[in-house]
Amino acid sequence: MPKQTFVLNGEPVTVDVEDDVRVLWVLRDLLGVQGPKYGCGINVCKACTSHLNGRAFNPCSVRVGDLAEEDRVTTIEGLPGEVGADDGELHPMQEAWIDRDVPQCGYCQPGQIMAAVALVKKVKREGRTLQESDLDTIRNICRCGTYTRIREAVEQGSRAMS
Amino acid sequence: MSISQGRSTGGSTSGTSTGAGVGRRSFLGYVIGGSTLVAAADLAVQATANPAHAGGVPSPPQVPELYDLEDLQTDAALPTSALITVEIREDGTAHFAIPRMEVGQGITTSTAMILADELDLPLSKVEVTLAPARPELVFNQLTGGSNTTVSTYTPIRVAAAIARKALLDAAAIELGYAVTRLKTYKGLVEAPDGATVSYGDLSAKAAASSTQQVEVELKPAADRKVVGTPRNRDDARAAVTGRKQFTMDLDVPDALPTMICRAPTLNGTPKALNNETEILRMPGVTHVALVDTGVAVRARTFGQCIDAVRAMDVDWNPGTAEGESDATILKKLRQAEIPLAVPKVPLLATTVEADFAFAFRSSAALEPNCAIADVRDDSAEIWAGLKVPILAQENIAQELGMRVDQVKVNVVTGGGSFGHKLFSDAAIEAAKTSRAMGVPVRLMWHRADEPRQGRLHPMCTSRVRATVLGKNVLTFEQRLTSVVTDFSHGLGEIISSTIDEAPTEVGRKLGGLGFSETIFTLTQELPYDFGVVTQLLSETDDSFNTGSMRNIYSPDTAVASELVVDQIGRKMGLDPLEVRRRFVKSDVVRRCLDTVAREGRWGRRMPKGMAQGIAVHKEYKGATAVLVEIDCRPETVNRKIRKAVTGPRVTKAVIAVDAGLVINPRGVEAQMQGGFMDGLALTLTSSCHLEDGHFLEASWDNYFYTRQWNVPPEVEVHVVESDSEQPGGVGEAAVGSSAAAVACAYVRATKKMPAYFPINHAELSFEPKSFVPPVPASPTDGLKYTY
């Protein structure tokens, strides 16, 4: 069985698994990293949203064999590490989420937060400030309907990230 | 089955419970014998409350004004309230295992708040967990009908008050002062000399060697410090760090991923798997088994299960809806409709009539149906999100040929429910699969399985005929005709066993009705003085997998009746706010209505193609009103978003709720917002299409639940001051009024009255995915969509 190596939340990992298994299952079923959730498996619901080299991606739709050894996969568990947070500290977007009391059932929220961080970074890369229309582009489903608080938290987190 | 048995003898009731003795402060309970302090309430004998009202041509009270589904569920829980205990542990914390399920509605948080107040403990020292299936609780372990806080509020407080009393009694000996001179705060008992002793130190001393009956007084409202203040969810940090565990995250040894290959038509069953050897040779696959719902496969990863499901060559038996489509089911509904029969009215009266159809809708949560099962020869253990775990345990035991005590059922926090987890479909399926394979399984449905084979809100029609004379409404008749709603999750049994508790006049009205009609009658209340009001349900066709969906009948009923209220207003020359103000019969509803009208600036000028809409709903011991503004201008309706339904955009929503006594205002606000998003989807975007024996939807880009591009940029929630000392239900309260307000606004903006909801149902906005194989391939192009 092929060995798959990549960087997960700052640490190199190696797993014995076939090339075509999607990264989501490598994370969840083999490595026990369960922040990314399954909600559709076809890159629609976005519950598994994580970061690949700092950009949002959906591990349900990427073969583990397509990852290179130096590729950096960050899940919600590793998000605080992206901003060099100390042990127990959180990313400003997570703080905004807690402050706005966004979660209800919580199932989609890791993906929502990872999507929000990537959206804010993208808007900044483009030299813009976050607009209402940017919030409309977030595709992540929340079946509890926490959308209003998600919008508030993304704006609050965006301010904290600058 | 009929619930009429025994009803005819129910003459002894004199208007029982209505709120588990709210208003009363003195209660009995027990200190349970044991090594640490454990206390329980005894509410088996209950006190009373009341109804009242006034206002157009008065309508006699409808059943829910006297006794509603909340009262019934609360009564059903009372006889076993003594089995619900609060424990004070030696570390000074309180523990309570709530016999309900947390699915995102915030009950562990609000319950901890109630306990903190009654115990004088900091909120951080109260731990609320979910109880496993406890058969001895009988009817006191069903999470539904927005009833958790309504039914548990008083029993929990009584148990906590008894615990606090026992702590004080023990402290009196310890500190050498009479109880009356001691005070409690922050988990300490303090004597007049300043000496203190902690609850933790008192726990063992306060424990009773044998169970003793105790009488206590509950704290007065003025002493509440936590209840009524906004609090964040107790699990928010776990949720945002990815540490909150759901069923599929649990570490159960050897419970490998398992999925089911399901039939191409609804409820089809497997005949044979023709390529078992090939499937067993696929990477990662360990086991294959035929079960009654399909062909199960267990593998090292779920991805490999999906690949195996797609590779299976299966012969299928036909399903339960072969050849049926939306049109054929609608035809059956039309045939089952009960005639509208207007009583004699004066010759000059005119009628307002309306007739709407509502499509099937999916109640699936984002966490799909799932369960872990470890079935051995002489025992079984199950882990799943279950709102009625006792029944799940019974069903699984029966399925496995075991005794109930051989089956342990653990209740896991759910990733949403919306009624979906009232049933234990996945738990039963996992148990069967584990038995068939002889190994533990971690069973999960594919997303495509949910709308196609999972439980749906049934298709229905709602017809209304009102007669109007001058500025009065003389009659208002509404008929809901629906595909059968499945109540086999336990509510049916609760009704049969508890209905004798209802006041006699209610019992008389319910006599002879079946489960569905009883639930309909216990929940539907038209909040207007419209003279002779009748609202009736008839059902047909039980071949579908159905259930409640964040309400049962109310959203569809409210959409139809509120649209007709607008029409009545038009006939009388009254705008939608004026007509509601004129006829609304409850002050609670009126306050909500006035609040949204004021806060939402009712009547402000809108550009052509935009409009406001306003609607109300009364249920769950409270009321809601919703005001929306909708944009139906072509540039908005026709905006393009990849694989999305855009359409009209609600630009603003203002929601007011009277939720009775509010435990956690922040939780109430969340439920109002969430309820709104559901109502919005019901009216504008979300439905399932039945065609040739199967449902076409298989993805969140097919089933158009509200997405960010549909969300109103402005959403306001106003929790109005309530006169009630009783908590109301909030999880479902906003759905009906929201769906109705959006519909009313849409009609005002477009001047078109839809015949079908959601309004986009006639147009199929996606390419259906394959039925064989039943699940789509896992994409490989994810790197193209990074941002």
Image (cartoon, coloured by chain):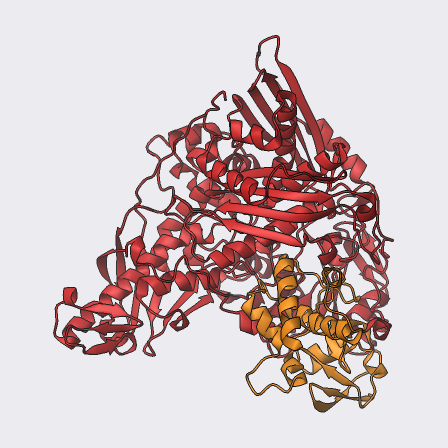
- Compared across the picture, whether B769 is left or right of B389 comes to right
The quarter of the rendered structure image containing the C terminus of chain A is bottom right
Among the chains, which one is red? B
- Compared across the picture, whether B689 is left or right of B11 comes to right
Q: Quadrant of residue B18?
A: top left
The image shows residue B573, relative to residue B163, as above or below, that is: above
Residue at the top extreme, as displayed: B347
The quarter of the rendered structure image containing the N terminus of chain A is bottom right
The image shows residue B677, relative to residue B230, as above or below, that is: above
Front residue of B467/B377: it is B467
Q: Position of residue B730 (x, y in %)?
A: 51, 50
The image shows residue B356, relative to residue B470, as above or below, that is: below
Among the chains, which one is orange? A
Front residue of B635/B47: it is B635
Asked if residue B269 can be seen in this view, the reply is: yes
Asked if residue B373 can be seen in this view, the reply is: no
Q: Residue at x 81, y 78 (%)?
A: B283
Q: Residue at x 36, y 42 (%)?
A: B17
Q: Position of residue B443 (x, y in %)?
A: 67, 67
Report the number of numbered marks.
Answer: 0
Q: Position of residue B632 (x, y in %)?
A: 77, 42
- Compared across the picture, whether B110 is left or right of B714 comes to left
